[in-house]
Amino acid sequence: MRKLLSILLVLAMMLALVPAALADGDLEPITLTVFRGDPGDQPYPDNKIYKKIEEEFGVTFEFEFLAGDLDEKLTLMTQDLDDLPDLFDGGNSAEKLIDAGALINLLDYVNPEDTPNLWAHIEPQKNRIITKDEVTGEDVMYIIPNYGLPEGPQIALSVGGPAFFIQKQVLAWGGYPQITTLDEYFDLIEKFLEANPTNADGTPYIGFDILCEDWRRFCLINPVQHLMGHPNDGEVLIDVNSDDYPTETFINRAYAKPYYKKLNEEFQKGIISADTFVMNYDQYIAQLSTGIVLGMFDQAWDFGNATNALLTDKKYENTYVALGLVYDEDDVAGLLPEGWTIEEHYLNGSLPNLDRGFGISVSCECPERIIAMWERMMDEDWQLLFNWGVEGEDYSIVDGRLIMTEEQYANTQDIEWQRHNKARAFFESSPKRQGWILEGDLAGNCWEPGNQNEIVFGLMNDYDKEFLAAYGYSKFADFVNPPIELAPYGEAWQIDKAPIEKDYNDFLNIQDSQLPGVIMANPDDFDAKWDAFVEAINPSCEVYSNFMHEEVLKLVDAYYGK
């Protein structure tokens, strides 16, 4: 009954709010232009989910995916605010869209009365999601987070974020060791390469990749904070045990040097290829997809396409495990901040993906219609369609449990199958339900198939079952510590750096231009190059550290309603 009333309410809203409906009550067909701030694949014309969207909502899509530099693209696109795509995903530079005035305030359309589904979705984290306009002081929300608003207790079956990753076959070859430090990690990769320089096809293995392109420079920069035993705050370390939340950049600190010294040593040994510093993202994913890269620091979602390609090819031994590496305290003796201790924290609490996802542009002529569509899509039937597919075709319900056959689940990981059968380009950036289904006949199931027990464990391939058994683990998250409580400020990487744009860009550009050279330096020149790097970046680090400290304190005050 509740579901029926919800559907009737939304239909009433759509008829009331959406102009240009046809005389028979059907919505006028429209095409929404969509920009995604990431590379992607166009869905095929016969895609069944997009067909269903067109049937119910009268909406078709024209997708444009990122090609080239994201910041340059967004700067170019926002020069004319009258000619923007209807739906805009600015990726990791979404703040540029907000600062340019390219997005509408969604709170003009989203509220408890008119959009109860969307409001219920954001309400638990509204103190983080809804902010104040610095000029007018009004409440604003330009983007509904696309991820990070799960329902029910946190599900931690694997690592979806940052970590040092290593191929399962390397750990298996090494006798399933416990790897906790950087030295142990590279030592095992070196020994594997010495014994196995090529794969079965004769292609040489690559020991360690470093992705440096554009905003994905986090693969080059961020490892230090995790080696220091801290979760992901982007480019700063924050002492959450102090009421004042002391904040500092880490890239210019003495405790960062041992990491880059280690990379320098591995480069000299040939474990790291010079090509890694000039690879673009597509080349990086293509390389990982072949199974020849043994290790890298990255975030699991960032190389998901490569993982799917390996699974499709049944190269299970070439897929990756996330390891929670930290410094051996002997490596940073005397270098740690006062009172600092190292304890591995690679998993943080659930976090809304602030300013990541779709915003509606100021040039869109039908924002009410998009909002009404999103509201309806938050209902159970549409969320199941996006996540699980078509019942009886892509999954089944048996005794109240959502299940898939091995073939059905394998399909969901096949990129070509997705282009015919998933609305990935739209759904990835749209508001969505995650975590546990808490109400109705399906309560106790998971919204996402990848979290469902019957799939995670029931359909796990034999290689992974034997691999976990060798470690005595039940899930891949067991390789890292359990999630810690999310800090009141969230995660600091989400803070908009626009107020210090010049200094922040200097901070990034110096790292981009000098760190690869530090890593590739002749060992005799390493210390001098490191010192020159630190001297060059110190001024922007000081500005950035002070700014981030002020912004962290503002977020803490907002969280506590001060």
Image: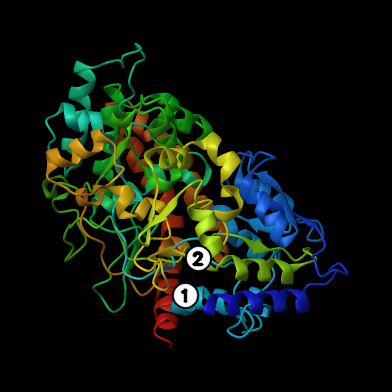
**Vertical position of residue 413 compared to residue 126: above or below:** above
Residue plotted at (48% across, 38% down):
513
Q: Where is residue 386 shown, x and y percent of the image?
A: 54, 55
**Vertical position of residue 213 compared to residue 435: above or below:** above
Task: Name the amino acid, label 2.
Answer: Leu
Query: Which quadrant holds residue 242?
Result: bottom left
Give the SS element for disc 1.
helix
Work out whether residue 69 or residue 476 is closer to the camera in this orientation and state it: 476
Disc 1: CA contacts within 10 A as few (<14), some (14-19) or many (>=20): some
Q: Where is residue 75 shown, x and y percent of the image?
A: 69, 52
Label ID, residue 128: 1
In the rendered structure, the answer to whether residue 329 lies left or right of residue 285 reads: left
Residue bearing mark 2: 354
Q: Where is residue 38 shown, x and y percent of the image?
A: 57, 45
Task: Name the amino acid, label 1.
Answer: Arg
Query: Which quadrant holds residue 274?
Result: top left
Query: Which quadrant holds residue 86?
Result: bottom right
Regarding residue 411, the answer to whether it shows in the image is yes
Residue plotted at (42% across, 31% down):
312
Instruction: Check the image and tell me how it is coloured.
Output: rainbow
Residue plotted at (44% across, 41% down):
408
Work out whether residue 172 or residue 347 is closer to the camera in this orientation and state it: 172
Q: Name the outermost residue toward the right.
A: 23
* Image marks 1 and 2: residues in contact by CB distance under 8 Å: yes
In the rendered structure, the answer to whether residue 447 lies left or right of residue 129 reads: left
* Quadrant in which the C terminus is drawn: bottom left
